[in-house]
Amino acid sequence: MVTQAQYTTFKEESLQNQPIRKNIRLTDLQFVTLDCVEYSGIKLGISRTALKDLLSIVGISLSGMKTLESSIGEEGANKFLNALKNAIGSHKSAEVTILVTPDRVISRMQKTGKIDLISAPTFFDTFERIMNTHSLEIKDMSFNKQNGNIHINTHKPKDQFQVNNFKDEIFTTGLSLSRTIEGIQADPFMHRLVCTNGMVTRAFDESFNLRSLEPKMWNDFFQHLERIEKSGFVPSKFTGKVNQAMQTPASLAELERASNLLLNNSNLPENELEFFLKGHKNTYNRLHSAGIDETKLSTDQKRNLRTGVKMWDLINGITDFASHNYGYEKKQNSDRHLQVQAGDLLAKGFDTQNIILNQPF
């Protein structure tokens, strides 16, 4: 459990390291390179996410910009982007809101007025009210200095929820609360007692995104939390999906997705995936024995190819990796990302759930 002192330190550090929010005219930004812009004589870095934001505003995809850069060179691409940006800014009086990190990097960019950014102090005030009202305890928390995102997982350790009569499927439940440029996101948080794995179930109906400071939105938000507390913060479809995941083999596409999540977010060696994704090695051995070269299969073919790994084992492998420190270096805030991805995998329609093996033709 996170102590009050740890939470207070976390809160203070999060508030001190928040990106600066500033409204500027689009025409006031000038590209030096695709990774650097100049504003009022000051050079600022620009993250890939902020670049995508800007390209979206001016109507170009990131892949299109890379194609342009490869054909006319970086200097030519910069001139083109500046010209297009200035043309749009001049005709539409475009004003954008930028978030600048303490180390002078633009981390996000949105059209001014598109999103009513909820401040970090407001988030913490809201979180503390929710935690006290619903008697929640903090399980873990994280802060991203690059974009100012705050994530806190909470649960009720004394209240336990069991899936049917499965002795290994006992959970404590609670809320996962996040503050991003999109607002305040509240999702059910499931903490599996066996292996102590955490999962954020964002894709179920019980999730709520508070995007506005309007009184009606606040009222709807807190009423929603009161409703889902009555069900113990357990998504209504959770038990059914767990049962289905226990019985459904993961497709090769789903197994690859899980493998890539672990490999791309850490320095985990590929030959050690078996430790988290039981059946991974055997699946590929049997495919190769059957003369199947997975590198030559299309994505759709991989979705229709069953593996020796059940979906529930796949999901728990991801949450196990996300919820513990096994000595592998992980990317900053990757634990939260993996917990959300695991919840998304559980909520989605499984690739092989409707495959009919015995067919007359």
Image (cartoon, rainbow, N blue to C red):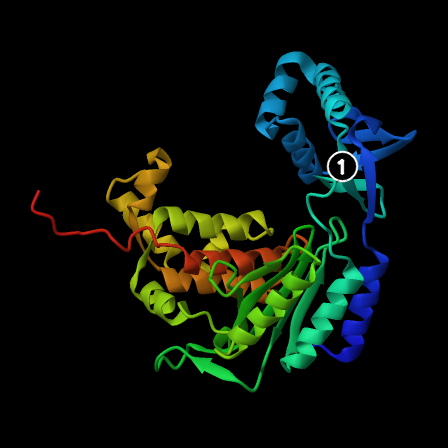
Residue closer to the observer: 291 or 152: 152
Q: Quadrant of residue 238?
A: bottom left
- Residue drawn at x 50%, y 66% as measured from the top left: 206
- Residue drawn at x 48%, y 60% as measured from the top left: 343
Q: Which residue is denoted by mark 1 in the rendering? A: 96
Question: Quick one: which residue is furthest to the right in this view?
Answer: 41
Residue closer to the observer: 5 or 272: 5
> Label 1's element?
strand
Classify residue 165 as left or right of residue 233: left
Image coordinates for residue 93, horizontal then vertical, percent = 77, 28
- Residue drawn at x 24%, y 44% as measured from the top left: 290
Q: Is residue 252 above or below residue 186?
A: above
Question: Quick one: which residue is furthest to the left in this view?
Answer: 360
Which corner quadrant holds the C terminus?
Answer: top left
Classify residue 131 as left or right of residue 192: right
- Residue drawn at x 52%, y 60% as measured from the top left: 202
Question: Quick one: which residue is furthest to the front in this view?
Answer: 216
Image coordinates for residue 346, horizontal then vertical, percent = 42, 60
Question: Quick one: which residue is furthest to the bottom in this view?
Answer: 158
Classify residue 44 as left or right of residue 307: right
Q: Quadrant of residue 86?
A: top right
